[in-house]
Amino acid sequence: MARKTPLTSLSQISEINLTPLMDLTFILLITFIITFPLIEQGISVDLPRGDATDLSARRARTISLNSRDQLFLDDAPIGEDMLRRRMIELGKNDPSVSVMVRADRRIAYGSVVRILRILHEARIRNMALITRADSESSP
């Protein structure tokens, strides 16, 4: 029995189809665009109102203190002693880092002062107290 197609007419496909790769890239990009704003606001904190300028968070760490006086470093729960050690280490390794403190408006003033004292002892000079703009609505 003879072949229907000669061996010389078969050619290799040397091109890669990029369409599925581009689809995957766009899906990942859209996923990150949607989820990125949720990462920063992961802990529910009712911020006090106040007028201030916007901050640029290039190399910033966030310390959050919720209404139950629970402490978080970049959305991860942390104890006060561990926070003190991490801030001292951060102050030595990267003195130009910024630390943003987000505290619920219903907690005692002394809790915020304890956090600020830790930052002062760690020699962190760039810190900010995050507030909600007067024009924003309550959650």
Image (spheres, rainbow, N blue to C red):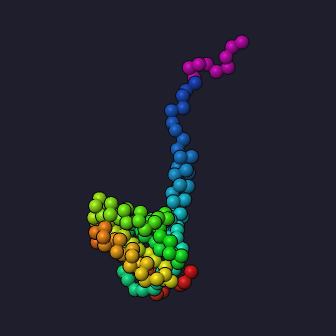
Q: Quadrant of residue 4?
A: top right
Q: Residue 126: in sight, yes or no?
A: no
> Which residue is located at x 69 percent, y 13 percent?
2
Q: Hey, which residue is sitting farthest top in the picture?
A: 1
Q: Residue 52: in sight, yes or no?
A: yes
Q: Position of residue 81 (x, y in %)?
A: 41, 65
> Which residue is located at x 39 percent, y 74 percent?
115
Q: Position of residue 66 (x, y in %)?
A: 51, 75
Q: Position of residue 11 (x, y in %)?
A: 55, 26
Q: Nearer the viewer, residue 85 or 75?
A: 85
Q: State which region is magenta.
A: 1-9
Q: Eyeballing the image, is 103 above or below 33?
A: below
Dominant secondary structure of the residues highlighted in magenta in the image: loop
Magenta run includes residue 38: no
> Which residue is located at x 51 percent, y 80 percent?
46
Q: Nearer the viewer, residue 107 or 102?
A: 107
> Which residue is located at x 43 percent, y 68 percent?
80
Q: Nearer the viewer, residue 22 or 42?
A: 42
Q: Position of residue 44 (x, y in %)?
A: 54, 74
Q: Quadrant of residue 126?
A: bottom left
Magenta run includes residue 6: yes
